[in-house]
Image: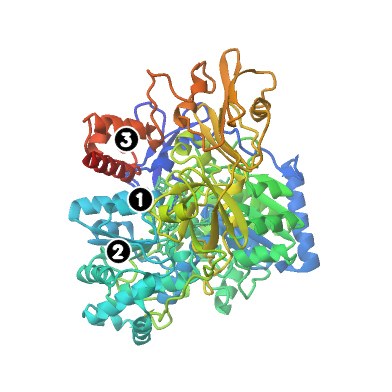
Amino acid sequence: MDGSGLPETRSTCPYCGVGCGVLLRPDGQGGLDMRGDPDHPANFGRLCSKGSALGETVGLDQRLLTPRVDGRQSDWDSALGLVASRFSQTIAEHGPDSVAFYVSGQLLTEDYYVANKLMKGFIGSANIDTNSRLCMASSVAGHKRAFGTDTVPGTYEDIDAADLVVLVGSNLAWCHPVLHQRVLAARKARGTKIVVIDPRRTASCDSADMHLALEPGSDVALFNRLLVKLYEGGALDKGFLAHTNGFDDTLHAAFSDDPSVTGLERVRIDKFCELWMRTEKVVTIYSQGVNQSSSGSDKVNAILNCHLATGRIGKSGCGPLSVTGQPNAMGGREVGGLANMLACHLDIENADHRAAVRDFWDAPRIPDAPGLKAVDMFRAVGDGRIKALWIIHTNPAVSMPEADAVRDSIAACPFTVVSDITEQTDTARLADVLLPATAWAEKDGTVTNSDRTISRQRAVLPPPGAARPDWEILAEVGRRMGYSAAFDYSSPAEIFREYAALSSLGSHFGRDFDISAFAALSDRDYATLAPVRWPVTASRRGGRFFADRRFFHSDGKAKLLPVRWRPPAAKTEPRYPFRLNTGRLRDQWHTMTRTGLSPRLAAHLPEPFAEIHPGDASRLGIARADLVRLTSPTGTAILRARLTDTVNPGQVFAPMHWTGETAPSARIDALVAAATDPVSGQPESKASVVAVSRFDAAWYGFAVSTREIALRSDYWALARTRHGYRAELAGAAAIADWEGEARRLFDAPDAQAVSVADHGRGVARIVLHEKGIVLGALFVAPEPVAVMRDYLSTVPGTAADSVLTGRPPADVPDPGPVVCSCFGIGVNSIIDAVESGKAASVEAVGAALGAGTNCGSCRPEIATLLQSIRQREAAE
Ligand SMILES: Nc1nc2c(c(=O)[nH]1)N[C@H]1C(S)=C(S)[C@@H](COP(=O)(O)OP(=O)(O)OC[C@H]3O[C@@H](n4cnc5c(=O)[nH]c(N)nc54)[C@H](O)[C@@H]3O)O[C@H]1N2
Ligand SMILES: Nc1nc2c(c(=O)[nH]1)N[C@H]1C(S)=C(S)[C@@H](COP(=O)(O)OP(=O)(O)OC[C@H]3O[C@@H](n4cnc5c(=O)[nH]c(N)nc54)[C@H](O)[C@@H]3O)O[C@H]1N2
Ligand code: SF4
Ligand SMILES: [Mo]
């Protein structure tokens, strides 16, 4: 409870794998009031900008509220009947491997369990894979090779106790902000050093002691060098090595690798190695710069080798910590959501494991070989081997590599079912049957975060329209396919108990995963379940793995793995001279179907862009704010150029978030080649090759509107604002009648227009009014339009009369682009506070304006801003 008297419900944030606890309370108008849960062990009350804005994303205006079949509204009985009969019919005609499920690390454990049981146990195929293939598969493979099972040995408390935190291919400040706050707290409390290993200078570097901008894909060579240095420096733990195999071969391989492929100066590498060697308590946090690579599994093992060789694992303040991306990426691994796993960390290829799971499920059949991994699965959809496909809680037409080909394959699949919360996604638009799922705040279940803590998600809002929880939809299809007894579930608690009972097989076969103490959990205890770290058995709750130096290979030892550096699969060449790196932004979540609804979040970076080194840009004749075309062997994109030396020459970085719904020319995965890691099958999302050229626009535009804008130009990008929408536009072909175009864009044929135009110069400004209220405004110029966008975004729906100038009236300050999205503080407000002497530090900016004092994610940006103002002042 808090002051208002209404009860708060404990739940978990549905975004990243930090797994922050939240306290939710419906505001009575369909929305939510929320705050961080002070008692949750992942966040102790903290939230990042995305978590804080969750209340703005639960509205119903884009929600899918009824099933749809062939684009027409339908009902559950017809839709589910059709799904069950088409799957059954396809299996009868073409065998179980002619169907597939593609699911998600954002599913709750209970949803995931039912999907896996239906496909592997009852349909009898292993063709269920998940977007975790694009995310965690290399870590899973690396863990299994080193430890014999997919155990994450590190915990969040280890960060608090570490003296050195190494971030490898992880932009923790933006992607796991609350964990990053924890690293910074350790630095404050005990002087923890921070090293970032990333080809790009990210927000995480702002607070780091050292940034190693290594060549893309060269991590193995760097960690091999570290192993050599540890050996030469006498830093190995011989006692610990007795509990491992493979050291000699591993060291030999490490010696034969050439560290110069990292592109880093020897002295910098040595400095890093010495710091690592000198510091007993080292936590290495790694993420997609490691996993999403054609040598991802080897990168993981190269890191694990160093921790194993020094015994820096299984004790406080030490260890490798693979941070999971999605809220239940870890739960999905436990439940067996990957095509090459069974359930509870058991192996599909092991006959004993198979037999035990089959008996437990009373299943007719269990496949004896792994199913198709994501990239191969969509290839099989493309060449007709898969004839019925069910996509749940993921948007592969955007997020898979070679996304245009994947989109076309899904479109051509004879029968595609999509379960989503909205029909406005690139994937949902391709569905034959579209099933409305309940969303985060409306559903119950559990998730497991990056450090093995299982937390409850709890429903606080009623399911809208006909929406149903994913587990229920899956179970209903199972029953309709003839497996009534196996899918006779009536609640997530019942599924969780069954899963917990199954997990005793984990221990039975000597595996780590076991939550069998929950097998008899009552509905009430499930309802009130507090966050708990697994394993949870009669004799053990949580605790640390490997403290006893016992691993899960058959001889109980860990394995060091000889690994050698390999370059990324795609080679730069004269036609494609740039390396394309991709990743995430602070305030958007993947394909933006939820974060895109929040005006606050959209304000941070409202348009897709490509970061290019200024030297490369000037060579290519690309100026600030120009549009650029990126072309790869698989696709093309048009994006805004951002000239910055945070990327090295020869490299381009672009965010992954924009889609056919928000910026159709910026579907970045259209450019990404589907090269995969040979062990994990994880695609190399960060090292494709592209050509870069200036996009020759005949005109550029900027528009604001109260309603969604009917965009269709060569380039456009749409974002929400508090007052409606804003859009960037550009086209290669001239348009003669701009007023007509404005009426079309704003769907306002009869509105009054005020305009100024200079046809000779190609400049036009049109404002459409209705009864004195601004409906929309369009600004066009032959070069990138210079108007005050943040001010103009506040104009639609008001009676503002200075719109045509593109600037605010003299007495209204322009806050400038948003830096702090929690409090909506713009860059100009911060500059004013600094220049007027009101604030001279990040803390003082916080005290004066509030900026940076809630989630703290913008503090690196404020620090950079302060630095650049100081530099400018010094130069003056
Ligand atoms: N704001 C936000 N947070 C998120 C998400 C989101 O969509 N938005 N998604 C969540 C999910 S599912 C995931 S998986 C995580 C991902 O979290 P992160 O892995 O931290 O995020 P990315 O931006 O994908 O990539 C991390 C970094 O890898 C670097 N990199 C590229 N190539 C290499 C290389 O060869 N070596 C090294 N060492 N680094 C390289 C990139 O420059 C990039 O800065 O974030 C989670 N959190
Ligand atoms: N180039 C490039 N590509 C990448 C990456 C990269 O770094 N670079 N990262 C990869 C990684 S790590 C990941 S995890 C993926 C993420 O990529 P996706 O999983 O494709 O992205 P999301 O936008 O999270 O898709 C989730 C979908 O589920 C829907 N949804 C929301 N709630 C529910 C619900 O309760 N039930 C159902 N059924 N649906 C719901 C949403 O509306 C949305 O359409 O992208 C991968 N692709
Ligand atoms: S760090 Fe942010 S996105 Fe991740 S779980 Fe916490 S509040 Fe949610
Ligand atoms: Mo991910």
Work out whether residue 42 can be spotted.
no
| 140 to 232, vertically: above or below | above
Residue hosting label 2 = 283
Residue 459: image x %, image y %? 51, 40
Residue 523: image x %, image y %? 49, 48
Q: Which of marks 3 and 2 is nearer the N terminus?
A: 2
Q: Nearer the viewer, mark 3 or mark 2?
A: 3
Residue 848: image x %, image y %? 26, 30
- State the SS at label 1: helix
Q: Residue at x 56, y 43 (%)?
A: 593
Image quarter of residue 379: bottom right
Q: Nearer the viewer, residue 202 or 876?
A: 876
Image quarter of residue 421: top right
Cβ–Cβ under 8 Å for marks 3 and 1: no
- Mark 2: amino acid: Val
Cβ–Cβ under 8 Å for marks 2 and 1: no
| 243 to 527, vertically: above or below | below
Q: Seen in the image, is 215 located left or right of residue 867?
A: right
Which image quadrant: the C terminus?
A: top left
